[in-house]
Each structure stands twice: as structure tokens, then as C-alpha cells.
Image (cartoon, rainbow, N blue to C red):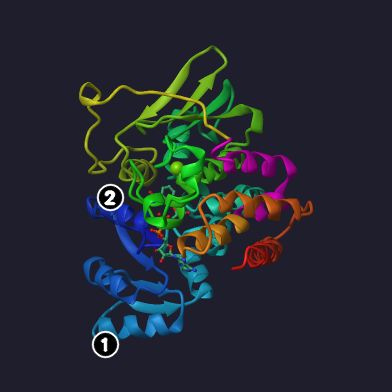
Amino acid sequence: MRSVAILGATGSIGENSLAVLSRHPDQFRIETLTGSTSADRMALLCREHQPATAVLADAAAANRLQTLLGTHSTTRVLAGTEALVEVATAADTDIVVAGIVGGAGLESTYAAVAAGKTVLLANKEALVMAGRLLLAAAKTSGAHIIPIDSEQNAMHQCMPHSAGGINLEGVQRILLTGSGGPFLHHSEDTLASVTPDQACNHPRWRMGRKISVDSATLMNKGLEYIETSYLFDLSPEQIEVVIHPQSIVHSMVTYLDGSVLAQMATPDMRVPIAYALGFPQRITSGADPLNLLNQEPLTFLPPDETRFPCLALARAALEQGEGHCIALNAANEVAVAAFLARQIQFTAIPQVIAQVLAKTEAAKPNSIDSVLLLDQAARGTAQSCLNQLGI
Ligand code: NAD
Ligand code: MG
């Protein structure tokens, strides 16, 4: 029996993780659930899954949760970032699902890695902000980082494993696939007027609003480009982005001898989550089996970087170094939030990011605190760019 903490349990990754865990009560115990401010949703989850601990982001939300659960509840209720770090590192937790969205997940994700946990990593922003520090911490602590982002999970499945972990010998390149998002076939001039709801209406995946917008701008592929480079220690030239609108092939690994291994499945996050929970065994996920005979033809095309400049911005940030990756992520979070609040147009998102990157200086932070300082500074710069746009 292994015990699991789900950071970001009230979100889309959290929901899919709980769905897989609920199928295997004999193998996993749900130890901790965390969320942001949604006490009602957390109360429902606590009643259903009876975690030992629940964490919400602030004291007001935690008090409300305590009231909703009543005095007879056995779930301990905590609040704040310190509590997140406490549950991510708790001795009685074996597996941590890092499912918080954005930079808000960095400290707890890092803490879980430094504590030597098995970390099921969805929070790609943490890797973009601090990939080198996270991988170094894993090496020291012995933590296993298993990506549950579907593409990186596919790569993990297609790479050779040895006793020491992934063995890259013979691996030549990665083909990182992406659906192209809801605006794949939109012309450049119609992109300016798309709404947040249109951007969040992803053709293949149901996800949180931030990652849905990232998928629509292709920044999600940009973040994954950086994520892939850190996670598997690959040079940027070894990673190629390929648009694959059907989202059946989740990425491919090409070998020196010309072989290409692809992982395929119906687009359902329960598949990568079940793989990571069971690894190295296989467990059921509840996802529909893939039926290639009923499937529309699989197609592949290059990304259009004129209509979707975010991918090139991410590639440039990776080349420029860690300070620029932090700034890219911070500016993207600020710009996406402004777009979701209907303050800026969809096409202003890459413009804000480009302006922030142009004002960023090279940096190589040596601690998570330094990363967070650079992140705050870049958010400030992004906010002033928005102010100049009259926001
Ligand atoms: P979501 O918005 O549905 O859920 C986000 C979770 O984070 C919620 O539980 C929320 O309460 C919590 N959270 C947000 N801000 C917080 C804060 N300040 N403090 C503490 N908790 C906070 O997002 P999601 O779609 O589940 O995505 C989560 C992460 O997984 C993102 O990094 C995303 O890129 C990645 N990811 C998601 C999917 C997917 O299918 N949803 C796929 C691949 C990767
Ligand atoms: Mg992905």
C-alpha cells in the first residue's frame, strides 16, 4: 500500500488522478488533498476520499472547509504554502502528484523532489522555472520524477530504462507532438478577436483554463519544449515539434538505427497518470481502448510559427538561459490571466512575452528563493507592459 498526496486535487489533473486511484484502493491510500480557495469542492472530495489532511491556500478558505466538514471529520485542515511544503515532504507520503498550475506549484514540487518522493509531475511550469535545480535535487535525494504531462509521459514510455533509470544511449531525437489547439486553422486576422471561452474549448482535451489558453497559443508546446530538454537532458536541436491534430500519438523517440517508437492512446489523462502510478508495473486507467479502425486518419504537419509566435519565443528563451525561461513563464502567466479577464486580446499574449524577454538579463539562480525573486521581477515587468497597453 503506497500513500499519495495530490497537490492541486480540485483541478483537472487532480480529478483524473482521483479517478485512477479510486480504481485501486488495495494499492494506494489517499493521504492528502490540496486546493486553492474552493472550500466547497474540497469538502466534497474530503467526504468521498477521506484524506488524512486537506490543505487550502489561505486561512479563510481553510476555516470554511473546517465548518463544512464539521467537528466529527477525521481530516486535518491546514492552510498556506508552508502547509503545502509540509504535506509534500511528510514521512508517511510516498507519492506526490504535482498538479498545481503555474509558478504557485514550484515550492511544493521542489520540496517533494528534495525529500526524495516519487513525484508525478504535471506542473511543467516548475521545470521551466527551475529545471536544473529540480533535476539536481532529484539526483541528490534519489527522488523519481515521472512526468504525467502526456507527451513527456509518452517519451518516458518509449525510452530505454535500466536499473539506474532512463538510459539515453541510442536515442537520437524526440518528436514532440501537439494537437495545434482550437485555432489550428484560424487565419491570422481572426485570431485577434477570439474569446477566452473559444480559447478554452480545446478540441481533444478538457483541462484547466490556463493550460487551455497555452494550448491555443502553442505556448504549451513551448513550455513542453523546455520541459523535455531539462527532463531528459536533451539539447534543443534534438527536439522537434510536430502538429498532430488527432492527439493519438502522444510523442515519439527516434533511435540511431532509424527506429521510431511512438506511444499511442485515446487522449485521456488517466492513461499517463495510471502509467506513472503503476510504474514499472501496468495498472488499469479506465480510459477507452484505442480503436484505430474507427479512428480518423492520423496526420502530422509542421507548426505555423507566424500565426503562433509563442513556440519561437520559448525556443529563444531556452537558448538564452535560465533567467529568460523564468521570465517567459512569468510573462505568460500574467498575459494569460489578463486575456482570461478580457483585458487584452489573444494576439497580445506573445507581444507582452516578447517585450518582457527583451528586458530580461541573463541569470543562473542557485536556489528556489532566487528563482522566485526573478519570477516576481518578471511579473512586475509584464504588469508594466500591460499598463502601457492601458490596463
Ligand atoms: P486546473 O486549473 O484545473 O487546476 C489547478 C489546481 O491548482 C487546482 O487544484 C487549484 O486549486 C490549484 N491551485 C491554483 N493556484 C493555486 C495556488 N496559488 N496555491 C495552491 N494551489 C493552487 O489546472 P490543470 O489543468 O489541472 O493543470 C495543472 C497543471 O498540470 C498545470 O501545470 C498544467 O500545465 C499541467 N497539465 C495539465 C493537463 C490537463 O489535462 N489538465 C495536462 C498536462 C499538464
Ligand atoms: Mg502536454
Circle 1: residue type: Thr
Residue on which the image places disc 2: 20
Q: In which quarter of the image is ligand 2?
A: top left
In the depicted structure, whether residue 67 falls above or below residue 381? below
Picture quadrant where residue 306 is located: top right
Question: In screen coordinates, is 335 left or right of 259?
Answer: right
Query: Where residue 1 appears, x then y in whole percent?
Result: 31, 55
User: What's drawn in magenta, residue-wise?
Assistant: 306-329
Identified at 39% across, 38% down, the residue is 280
Identified at 34% across, 31% down, the residue is 248
User: Tag 1, which secondary structure?
Assistant: loop
Residue on which the image places disc 1: 71
Identified at 24% across, 71% down, the residue is 44
In the depicted structure, whether residue 343 falls above or below residue 254? below
Circle 2: residue type: Val
Q: Can residue 95 be seen in this view?
A: no
The answer as to whether callout 2 falls within 8 Å of ligand 1 is no
Front-lying residue, 236 or 232: 236
